[in-house]
Amino acid sequence: MTAAWPMNKLAIHTRTTRNWDLRSCCAKYQQAGIGGVSVWRELIDPAQGGVSPDEARRIIVDAGLVVPALVRAGFFVSADTDERTAAIDDARVAIRDAQAIGAEQIVLVVGASPGVPLEHARSMVCDAVVAIADDAAQANLRLAIEPLHPMYASDRSCINTLANANDICAQIAHPQVGVALDVYHLWWEPGLATQIMRAGQAGRIFGVHICDWKTTLSDPLNDRGLMGDGCIDIANFMRSTEAAGFDGMFEVEVFSESYWAMDPDQYLALIIDRFSNLGTNPSLLND
Ligand code: ZN
C-alpha cells in the first residue's frame, strides 16, 4: 500500500501532542520525518512556561521543520471597546512572534460574544483584520481566518461557513488575508467543494487542518477524532483543496482528552499511521 501523501506534507499542531514542550515536539516530529510544526502560542510565551520566540526559532531550524502557522490570534468581538483594542494589540504581538519563529501565517479565531448580534460581530472582525493586515504584510505574514463550526457561534467565532469567510475575505480584499480550512468545522457545509474552489481561485487557501468528526462527541472542544475515527471523507477534502491550488502542508489538529491520555510516542506513531493511510482504499485492496 502506497501512501497518497508523503510525510513531508504532514505538519502537526503542537496542541495535538500537548504533553510535549516545543523542544520535544520538534525532536519527535523530526525523527518521524514530519515536515512541519504549527506552533501554539503558549509554547513560545515564557510567562506560560514556554521558550522565547528567538529560542523557538533556533529549535525549529535545528529540527529542519517548516512552520505553516502560529496559532492563534483573534477574539476580536466584544461590546467593550477596550477589549476590542486589547485583542488587536495582542494580534500585533502574535505578528511579531510569528515573524520571529518564521511562521508563514497566523490562524485567526475571530471571536463571538453572546451579547453581540452576529452581523455586528462580523463587522467588528472586518475592522480588526483590516487594522492588522498591513502589519502582517510588513512582517511577510499571512492572516488566515478560520471559520468554525456553528456550535461555536456564540462565543468563539461569528464566521461559521467557508462561504461567509470567502465573502468577508472578498470584502477585505487584502492579499495577506485568506482562510484556514479545518475539515472538522467545514465538512458538513452545503456546496463546500464550490467554496473551496472559490477560495483557491482567489489565492486565499493558506492552511488546511485535518482531523475527524466522531458522531458521538463527549465534549464539543476536546473530543476530536483522529483521521479514520469518524465520518469525514478526509482524503476527498484534501484532494479538493489541492485541485483548488493549495500546495502547502496538511496540519493535523486534534484536541482530545483520550488521546492526550495515551503514551505520546505511541500517539505520534498512530497519527503517522492514520496520515499514511489517507487516500488508500482498503476495500479495493481487499478485492
Ligand atoms: Zn483548525
Image (cartoon, rainbow, N blue to C red):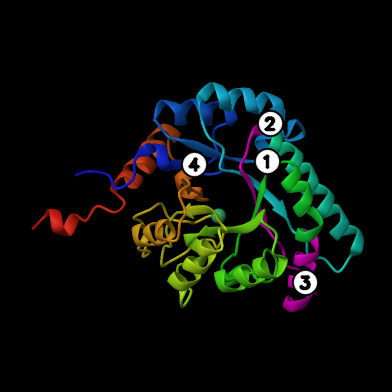
Residue 147: percent from left, percent from top: 60, 64
Q: Are marks 4 and 2 in contact (CB under 8 Å)?
A: no
Circle 2: is it few (<14), some (14-19), or many (20+) Cα within 10 Å? some
> Counting other residues with Cα less than 10 Å from the Cα at mark 3, is it few (<14), some (14-19), or many (20 or more)?
some
Tell me where the magenta segment starts and ends, as one range. 101-128
**Which residue is rendered at x = 34% and y = 55% of the image?**
228
The answer to which of marks 2 and 1 sits earlier in the sequence is 1
Between the residue at mark 4 and the residue at mark 2, the CA separation in whole angstroms equals 18 Å
Q: Is mark 1 within 8 Å of ligand 1?
A: no
Instruction: Please tell me in which quarter of the rendered image ligand 1 is found.
Output: bottom right
Q: CA distance from mark 2 to mark 1?
A: 8 Å
Q: Quadrant of the C terminus?
A: bottom left
Mark 1 and mark 4 lie on one chain; the one further toward the N terminus is 4
Q: Are marks 2 and 1 in contact (CB under 8 Å)?
A: yes
Check disc 3 and report its element: helix, strand or loop.
helix
The secondary element bearing badge 1 is classed as helix
Q: Position of residue 38 (x, y in %)?
A: 56, 41
Q: Are marks 1 and 4 in contact (CB under 8 Å)?
A: no
Asked which secondary structure carries label 2, the reply is loop
Circle 3 is placed at which residue position?
A: 123
The first of marks 3 and 1 along the sequence is 1
For the residue marked with disc 4, what is the amino acid?
Ile
- Horizontal and vertical percent position of residue 156: 68, 63
Of callouts 4 and 2, which one flags the residue occurring earlier in the amino acid sequence?
4
Left or right: 221 in relation to 174: left
Q: Residue tagged by mark 4? A: 12
For residue 163: magenta? Answer: no
In the picture of the structure, the residue carrying the numbered disc 2 is: 50
Q: Amino acid at mark 2?
A: Gly
Residues 20 and 202: in front is 202
Q: Determine the residue located farthest toward the right in the rendered image.
A: 82
Q: Which residue is mark 1?
A: 41
